[in-house]
Image: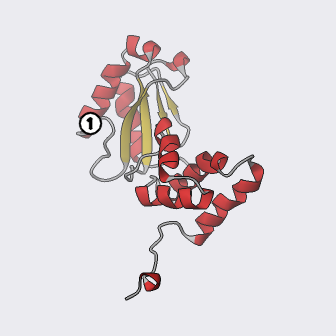
Amino acid sequence: MAAESIAKITMLSEPIREKIRAFIPRYPSKRAVTLPALHIVHEHFRCVPFQAMAEIAEILEITPAEVHDTMSFYGFFPQAPIGDVRVWVCRSISCMLTGGEEMLEHACHKLGIEPGQTTPDGKLTVEFAECLGICDFAPAALADDGRIFGPLTSDKVDAMLDDLKAGPKPVA
């Protein structure tokens, strides 16, 4: 069998590719579309697998390493699937001084996971953040659907987890 006759397996559907290509005229270079492309793929898959990085690179005519560099700079693009809701517990100086590390530990202990892991039912991923920019709520947490929690206490973390396990809140 000739190499030309082997079908190329792709991860990104044509509609996803078209969404990415639609950004190209809006930016000064194809490389500048890397971040929007990562958001598009993440929105669809809730992660950015290696194969998707390679396909983004192909569309944008850059190397997969360049896509990975952008992806790894921002902590919002996991390579493996995450829970239905993702929450970051802040551990910046303001949150750390008011108990952020303890709130992260409490949340993970209650869920039976470690930071960066997803609950076995796939409902919730808990991670730490270096800064969420919501120091007024320290210690604070932020869900990927925009919900802000804080100032956190052990009881408020328990209530937050119950709320988050119910699923993402619809965008108003």
Residue 144 seen from this side: no
Residue 132 point in image, percent of width and height: 51, 26
In the rendered structure, the answer to whether residue 156 lies left or right of residue 115 reads: right
Q: Residue furthest top?
A: 97
Q: Nearer the viewer, residue 121 or 6?
A: 6
* Residue that label 1 marks: 114
| Label 1 Cα crowd, 10 Å radius (few <14 / some 14-19 / many 20+) | some
Please tell me how many numbered marks the rendered image carries.
1
Q: Quadrant of the N terminus?
A: bottom left
Q: Residue furthest bottom?
A: 1
What is the secondary structure assignment of the residue under circle 1? loop
Residue 109 seen from this side: yes
Kindly indicate the quadrant of the structure image that contains residue 161: top left
In the rendered structure, the answer to whether residue 26 lies left or right of residue 146 reads: right
Which residue shows up at 46% across the image and 53% down it?
48
Which residue shows up at 37% across the image and 50% down it?
123
Residue 163 point in image, percent of width and height: 43, 40
Which residue shows up at 45% across the image and 52% down it?
47
Residue 34 point in image, percent of width and height: 60, 48
Kindly indicate the quadrant of the structure image that contains residue 100: top left
Query: What amino acid does circle 1 point to?
Result: Glu
